[in-house]
Amino acid sequence: MIMQECTSHMVEFWEEFSHMDATNETTCVDTTVIASIADKLFQVMPLLRKRMLRLDGVQAEHGIPLSHVQVLAMLEEPGSMSVSEISRRFGIAKPNITPLVDRLISAGLVERVRNKADRRVVDVYILDSGREKLKEIQQSLYDHVLNWSNSVSPEDYVELNNALTTIIRVLGEL
Protein backbone atom coordinates (compact mmCIF):
# COMPACT_ATOMS: atom_id res chain seq x y z
CA MET A 1 0.00 0.00 0.00
CA ILE A 2 2.69 2.49 1.00
CA MET A 3 4.81 1.52 -2.02
CA GLN A 4 1.79 2.09 -4.29
CA GLU A 5 1.20 5.52 -2.73
CA CYS A 6 4.88 6.41 -3.06
CA THR A 7 4.96 5.18 -6.63
CA SER A 8 1.86 7.20 -7.52
CA HIS A 9 3.49 10.33 -6.08
CA MET A 10 6.58 9.64 -8.14
CA VAL A 11 4.44 9.06 -11.23
CA GLU A 12 2.91 12.50 -10.67
CA PHE A 13 6.41 13.95 -10.25
CA TRP A 14 7.60 12.15 -13.39
CA GLU A 15 4.57 13.35 -15.40
CA GLU A 16 5.23 16.90 -14.27
CA PHE A 17 8.81 16.79 -15.58
CA SER A 18 8.51 14.31 -18.44
CA HIS A 19 7.02 16.88 -20.79
CA MET A 20 10.23 18.85 -20.53
CA ASP A 21 12.68 18.27 -23.32
CA ALA A 22 15.35 20.35 -21.71
CA THR A 23 18.94 19.74 -20.82
CA ASN A 24 20.42 20.71 -17.48
CA GLU A 25 22.91 23.45 -18.38
CA THR A 26 25.45 22.51 -15.71
CA THR A 27 25.59 18.78 -16.54
CA CYS A 28 24.41 18.59 -20.17
CA VAL A 29 22.10 15.73 -19.13
CA ASP A 30 18.50 15.57 -20.29
CA THR A 31 16.29 16.57 -17.34
CA THR A 32 13.92 13.70 -18.10
CA VAL A 33 16.83 11.30 -17.51
CA ILE A 34 17.57 13.01 -14.19
CA ALA A 35 13.90 12.76 -13.17
CA SER A 36 13.82 9.11 -14.21
CA ILE A 37 16.93 8.31 -12.14
CA ALA A 38 15.43 10.05 -9.12
CA ASP A 39 12.25 8.01 -9.58
CA LYS A 40 14.13 4.71 -9.93
CA LEU A 41 16.29 5.41 -6.88
CA PHE A 42 13.15 5.94 -4.86
CA GLN A 43 11.68 2.66 -6.13
CA VAL A 44 14.82 0.55 -5.72
CA MET A 45 15.56 1.44 -2.07
CA PRO A 46 12.91 -0.76 -0.46
CA LEU A 47 13.54 -3.53 -3.00
CA LEU A 48 17.25 -3.64 -2.16
CA ARG A 49 16.59 -3.60 1.56
CA LYS A 50 13.84 -6.20 1.75
CA ARG A 51 14.20 -8.50 -1.24
CA MET A 52 17.78 -8.36 -2.30
CA LEU A 53 19.83 -7.92 0.84
CA ARG A 54 17.61 -9.27 3.63
CA LEU A 55 19.48 -7.00 6.01
CA ASP A 56 17.15 -7.69 8.92
CA GLY A 57 17.71 -11.42 8.45
CA VAL A 58 21.48 -11.02 8.21
CA GLN A 59 21.53 -8.96 11.40
CA ALA A 60 19.42 -11.51 13.25
CA GLU A 61 21.25 -14.56 11.89
CA HIS A 62 24.74 -13.25 12.57
CA GLY A 63 24.08 -10.89 15.47
CA ILE A 64 25.85 -7.95 13.86
CA PRO A 65 24.49 -4.63 12.55
CA LEU A 66 24.99 -3.67 8.90
CA SER A 67 27.30 -0.79 9.85
CA HIS A 68 29.66 -3.30 11.51
CA VAL A 69 29.56 -5.55 8.44
CA GLN A 70 30.37 -2.56 6.23
CA VAL A 71 33.45 -1.72 8.31
CA LEU A 72 34.62 -5.35 8.21
CA ALA A 73 34.13 -5.41 4.42
CA MET A 74 36.01 -2.12 4.10
CA LEU A 75 38.92 -3.51 6.10
CA GLU A 76 39.03 -6.93 4.44
CA GLU A 77 41.20 -6.13 1.43
CA PRO A 78 43.69 -3.64 2.87
CA GLY A 79 43.72 -5.36 6.29
CA SER A 80 43.75 -2.02 8.08
CA MET A 81 42.59 1.54 7.69
CA SER A 82 42.78 4.69 9.78
CA VAL A 83 39.75 5.78 11.75
CA SER A 84 39.79 8.96 9.67
CA GLU A 85 39.63 6.98 6.41
CA ILE A 86 36.77 4.83 7.69
CA SER A 87 34.98 8.03 8.68
CA ARG A 88 35.59 9.59 5.25
CA ARG A 89 34.33 6.52 3.38
CA PHE A 90 31.20 6.32 5.52
CA GLY A 91 30.65 10.05 5.16
CA ILE A 92 30.13 10.55 8.88
CA ALA A 93 32.10 12.38 11.56
CA LYS A 94 35.07 10.64 13.17
CA PRO A 95 33.55 10.83 16.69
CA ASN A 96 30.61 8.77 15.40
CA ILE A 97 32.95 6.05 14.09
CA THR A 98 34.70 5.58 17.43
CA PRO A 99 31.77 3.86 19.23
CA LEU A 100 31.26 1.58 16.22
CA VAL A 101 34.93 0.58 16.28
CA ASP A 102 34.70 0.13 20.06
CA ARG A 103 31.84 -2.36 19.60
CA LEU A 104 33.82 -4.26 16.94
CA ILE A 105 36.78 -4.40 19.34
CA SER A 106 34.50 -5.66 22.15
CA ALA A 107 33.22 -8.36 19.78
CA GLY A 108 36.82 -9.39 19.08
CA LEU A 109 36.56 -8.64 15.34
CA VAL A 110 39.07 -5.77 15.00
CA GLU A 111 41.83 -4.11 16.96
CA ARG A 112 42.96 -0.50 17.21
CA VAL A 113 46.69 0.25 16.89
CA ARG A 114 48.59 3.54 16.83
CA ASN A 115 50.29 4.08 13.50
CA LYS A 116 54.06 3.64 13.90
CA ALA A 117 54.88 6.30 11.29
CA ASP A 118 52.50 8.89 12.79
CA ARG A 119 51.48 8.33 16.42
CA ARG A 120 48.56 10.74 16.00
CA VAL A 121 46.91 8.29 13.59
CA VAL A 122 44.92 5.33 14.89
CA ASP A 123 44.61 2.36 12.55
CA VAL A 124 41.93 -0.32 12.77
CA TYR A 125 43.02 -3.84 11.82
CA ILE A 126 40.62 -6.65 10.97
CA LEU A 127 41.34 -9.80 12.99
CA ASP A 128 41.01 -13.38 11.79
CA SER A 129 37.73 -13.61 13.72
CA GLY A 130 36.48 -10.53 11.82
CA ARG A 131 37.44 -12.11 8.51
CA GLU A 132 35.64 -15.30 9.52
CA LYS A 133 32.49 -13.39 10.53
CA LEU A 134 32.54 -11.51 7.23
CA LYS A 135 33.02 -14.78 5.33
CA GLU A 136 29.96 -16.27 7.10
CA ILE A 137 27.85 -13.24 6.18
CA GLN A 138 29.08 -13.30 2.57
CA GLN A 139 28.15 -17.00 2.39
CA SER A 140 24.66 -16.20 3.69
CA LEU A 141 24.23 -13.52 1.02
CA TYR A 142 25.57 -15.90 -1.64
CA ASP A 143 23.07 -18.56 -0.55
CA HIS A 144 20.28 -15.97 -0.61
CA VAL A 145 21.14 -14.88 -4.16
CA LEU A 146 21.46 -18.51 -5.24
CA ASN A 147 17.93 -19.15 -3.97
CA TRP A 148 16.63 -16.65 -6.52
CA SER A 149 17.41 -19.17 -9.26
CA ASN A 150 13.82 -20.46 -9.08
CA SER A 151 12.53 -17.11 -10.26
CA VAL A 152 15.50 -15.32 -11.87
CA SER A 153 16.81 -16.36 -15.25
CA PRO A 154 20.55 -16.77 -15.93
CA GLU A 155 20.32 -13.77 -18.26
CA ASP A 156 18.78 -11.66 -15.49
CA TYR A 157 21.56 -12.71 -13.09
CA VAL A 158 24.11 -11.41 -15.62
CA GLU A 159 22.11 -8.23 -16.21
CA LEU A 160 21.78 -7.61 -12.47
CA ASN A 161 25.51 -8.17 -11.98
CA ASN A 162 26.30 -5.70 -14.78
CA ALA A 163 23.85 -3.14 -13.37
CA LEU A 164 25.34 -3.40 -9.88
CA THR A 165 28.85 -3.07 -11.33
CA THR A 166 27.76 0.11 -13.10
CA ILE A 167 26.14 1.48 -9.94
CA ILE A 168 29.33 0.88 -7.96
CA ARG A 169 31.45 2.53 -10.65
CA VAL A 170 29.21 5.56 -11.12
CA LEU A 171 28.50 6.20 -7.45
CA GLY A 172 32.15 5.58 -6.58
CA GLU A 173 33.08 8.49 -8.84
CA LEU A 174 30.78 10.97 -7.06
Image (tube, rainbow, N blue to C red):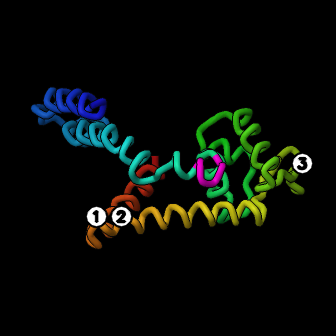
* Tag 2 residue: 148
Q: Earlier in the sequence, mark 3 or mark 2?
A: 3
Q: Residue at x 82, y 54 (%)?
A: 111
The amino acid type of the residue labelled 2 equals Trp
**Residue 62 colored magenta?**
yes
Q: How many marks?
A: 3
Above or below, comparing residue 3 to residue 158 in the picture: above
- SS category of the residue bearing label 1: loop
The amino acid type of the residue labelled 3 equals Arg
Q: Residue at x 33, y 67 (%)?
A: 157
x, y percentage for residue 74?
63, 56
Q: Earlier in the sequence, mark 1 or mark 3?
A: 3
Mark in front: 1 vs 3: 1
Residue 37 is left or right of residue 167, and the answer is left
Q: Can residue 28 be seen in the rendering of this structure? A: no
Q: Residue at x 48, y 52 (%)?
A: 172
x, y percentage for residue 22?
16, 35
In front of the other: 125 or 30: 125
Real-space CA distance between mark 3 and mark 2, rounded to the nearest whole angstrom: 49 Å
Above or below, comparing residue 24 to residue 60 in the picture: above
**Residue 28 colored magenta?**
no
- Give the magenta-colored segment's residue range: 59-64
Real-space CA distance between mark 1 and mark 3, rounded to the nearest whole angstrom: 54 Å
Residue 151, disc: 1
Q: Are marks 3 and 2 in contact (CB under 8 Å)?
A: no
Q: Residue 154 lies in what quarter of the image?
A: bottom left
x, y percentage for residue 39?
27, 37
* Tag 3 residue: 119
Q: Are marks 2 and 1 in contact (CB under 8 Å)?
A: yes
Count neighbours of disc 1 (C-alpha within 10 A) and say few if under 14, some if 14 to 19, many if 20 or more.
few
